[in-house]
Image (spheres, rainbow, N blue to C red):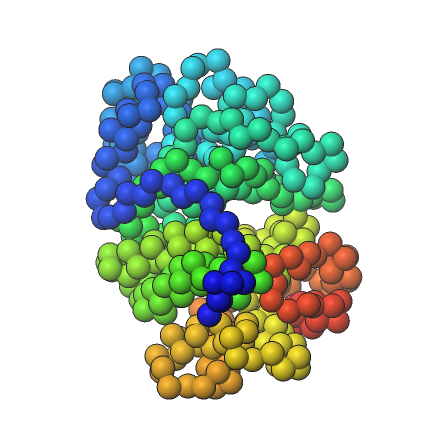
Amino acid sequence: MLHFNTMSFTLQRQPYVVFGAGKVSLLPELLGSYGESVVIVTGGKTLERSGTIAALYERIQRESTLCRHVAIDGEPSPEVIDGAVEACRDSGINVVAALGGGSVIDAGKAVSAMLPSREPVERFIEGLPGYCKPDGRKVPFIAVPTTSGTGSEATNNAVISRTGKNGYKRSLRHDAFVPDMALLDPELTLSMPVGLTVSSGMDALTQLLEALVSPDGSPFTEAVALNGLEYVAAYFSRACRNGEHDIEARSGMSYAAYLSGVALVNAGLGIVHGFASSIGGYIDIPHGRLCATLLHAATAENIAILRQQGIRGDGVLASYAKAGRLFAGDTYLDDDEACDALLEKLESMQEELDIPQLGTFGFRNGDVDRVISRTRNKSNPAELDGNSLRRILLQRL
Ligand SMILES: [Fe+2]
């Protein structure tokens, strides 16, 4: 527990949240509260594949004066964002809504952020040459997730990707870019295939665990992360097994994923997400799969280093232990036993969920040094040197 004489933190704004099965039918009315010119962002094939979203889109078209549709395939590149903004810019757009997974929500967030600007999005992407901080102007944005993973519906950044030799996976970020509204309807996630349920759920789990032990956290983020982990422990494997028919499990995972976004935007993330940035721009590997493959090895390395340093009690190991007791369902474990229980659980999940190794995606031994040199370790609870980073990667080659 942090004590009041040492406590110091800030909390980001949060979206207005509407949560519940069937609530997506409120979208036309919620859009109308902002105005009658709208942009709807979806995945490339969503309108053909989802009867619910296609019917909703028709209703929005009928009820709006102007309705533009932006279809996004894969992770958004700068060209895709600039093209979408160009097509919509002079239409007096009142509101943008994105219905989809993390990439679609990020694309919608970026389009809403760039509509008032006359410049290409790459000027505002963190870490690129000539970076210019966004001024926070944007068009109101509603996020409607159809997966349970990234928590992008609660965060202040949009990840923009360029793959290839000079590739990157970096953020367009401003506190004002937190969505104005998050419409969370677990029914939209019922049809997620097992592979996507696994990878998006592992992303949410990684975010909750990394935020829980972040040195930049607060009592608020600890409470949020633990609550999210409670729902992951109760519902993740149910959602993976029989998700198509289990609205209770899907609701639990939608809620956990939202909390993972709240936790990460306020606490930051650890080394798994450090690798997500360095490896993600280098080889083409879906974000959730990268988190899934590295989570156990990275957590084991963190716990080993923290044990060597002998920091116990109210420290990070105690936080890992709280997560361990949740997953073990045993409140009587001491901190050491609970940390071991957490590692056992993460390792067994890796096997049960058949998580592929990095090599499956074309990552090779010869890539390790280059990735380590580009990996940042910002909100990780332990100082990890090059040897630690190498150990994590080599375990998962
Ligand atoms: Fe993530």
Residue pictured at 28% horizontal, 31% vertical: 30
Looking at the picture, tell me which residue is in the foreground, 277 or 178: 178
As displayed, is residue 72 above or below residue 284? above
Q: Is residue 298 above or below residue 163?
A: below
* Quarter of the rendering occupied by the C terminus: bottom right
* Residue 67 visible in the current orientation: no
Q: Where does the image place residue 267, in percent across and percent down from the top left?
A: 52, 56
Quarter assignment of residue 255: bottom left
- Residue 211 horizontal side relative to residue 396, left or right: left
Q: x, y percentage for residue 377?
A: 66, 59
Q: Position of residue 239 (x, y in %)?
A: 32, 62
User: Could you tell me residue 251's position as x and y percent?
Assistant: 28, 56
Residue at point 24%, 48% (across, down): 20
**In this rendering, does residue 381 appear at all?**
yes
96 over 318 or under it: above or below: above
Residue 290's image quarter?
bottom right
355, 62: nearer the viewer: 62
Residue 220 sits in which quadrant? bottom left
Taking the spot 66% from the left edge, 79% from the top edge, the residue there is 309
Taking the image as shown, residue 121 lies to the left or right of residue 323, namely: right
Tell which of 338 and 105 is nearer to you: 338
